[in-house]
Amino acid sequence: MRTYLVTGGAGFIGSNYIHYMFDKYGDEIRIINVDKLTYAGNLENLKDIESRANYTFVKADICDKEAIAKIFEENDIDRVVHFAAESHVDRSIKNPEVFVQTNVLGTAVMLNSAKAAWENEDGSFKDDKRFLHVSTDEVYGSLPDDPNAYFYETTPIDPHSPYSSSKASSDLLVKAYVDTYKFPAIITNCSNNYGPYQFPEKLIPLIINNALAGKNLPVYGDGKNVRDWLYVMDHAKGIDMATESGRFGERYNIGGHNEKQNIEIINIIIETLQELLPDSDPRKANVTKDLITYVTDRKGHDRRYAIAPDKIKEEIGWYPETMFKDGIRLTIKWYLENEDWMKNVTSGDYQKYYEGMYANR
């Protein structure tokens, strides 16, 4: 049975990845989920699988050398899939040191622990061990408004926020381990994810939640910043395929081919909520474009991201399967059907789930 160590598995992308992996492989794999459970980590995301015999949760900080080393000592880890990171740009602008600590030093701890566990006496590595480092398209900086301009794996790294700088640093650290030690690592850089379980500081769940509550829908600047949107389950599939078939030392862009301006996203959400909410729901009357409120632009706000997933399609056979019009509908329906999850997250009660489930373990 292959054993996966997933860091940050209680977060948005990590929890969707764990669901994807169990749906695909069932009892053929074992997953150890390591998560610090900060504001973005929520074990309610995984409550439907916590009773599985082949799933283990460990509450730990990836910066804790002893805790991570212990996991490797007590388990024969075959795969590390490294999601754990501080990922909210606005928070990085206010407190950049935390992002450097987690995203750079935490990645160093993961690399060193895996290296110590997997390295043979002659400096080579045990067969069939792989480390997949999950990163972002934000490390590339910003693109011009030219619709023919895209981020490729060869695009120079040019980050503009403390968040993207910390992720670029972690990418380069992984590359250095490959170059220096021949460490068996692969890097993926994804575009903006959306889907179930996303923390409502991010654009799409924030707009859904605010619209349902009749609150203002904040739009940075003129609202014409462009992002490439990737449905999270498509991303999970890409990560699995890159982990198994990617070449060590290579970077693979995972993009959705779904470019939208932020203001377009907000209008689509309003229109879809109007369609999905029944006339008997009093909130429907509140969901209007009158809620849109333009606010001062974010510092260092990149104008456009667009990622070309040509390499991963050619080498590995992955491509985005979910069009935005379908994915956003699935996402909004999930939030409407899981309003208790949103209430717990926005009130902070999601932390109580951990306390109730794991306090005596």
Image (cartoon, rainbow, N blue to C red):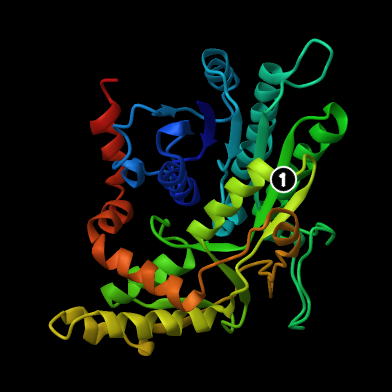
Side of 294 where 200 appears, left or right: left
**Residue at horizontal 50%, vertical 59%?**
232
In this view, the residue farthest toward the left is: 280
**Residue at horizontal 33%, vertical 76%?**
211
Depth order, front residue of 272/138? 272
Q: Where is residue 17 in the image (x, y as percent from the top left)?
A: 48, 47
10 Å crowding of disc 1: few (<14), some (14-19), many (20+): many
Can residue 133 be spotted in the picture?
A: no
Q: Which of the 4 image quarters holds residue 207? A: bottom left
In the figure, 320 relative to 356: above or below? below
Side of 82 where 278 appears, left or right: left
Q: Which of the 4 image quarters holds residue 118? A: top right
Give the total of numbered labels: 1
Q: Which of the 4 image quarters holds residue 111? A: top right
Depth order, front residue of 3/116? 3
Say which residue label 1 marks.
Answer: 246
Side of 46 where 6 appears, left or right: right
Q: Where is residue 49 in the image (x, y as percent from the top left)?
A: 32, 39
Q: What element carries label 1?
A: loop
Q: Quadrant of the C terminus?
A: top left
**Residue at horizontal 25%, vertical 31%?**
357
Q: Position of residue 286 (x, y in %)?
A: 26, 83
In the figure, 268 relative to 142: above or below? below
Can residue 121 be spotted in the picture?
A: yes
Depth order, front residue of 235/98? 235
In the figure, 153 relative to 172: above or below? below
Side of 151 where 193 appears, left or right: left
**Residue at horizontal 42%, vertical 41%?**
22
Amino acid residing under circle 1: Gly
Q: Position of residue 39 (x, y in %)?
A: 42, 46
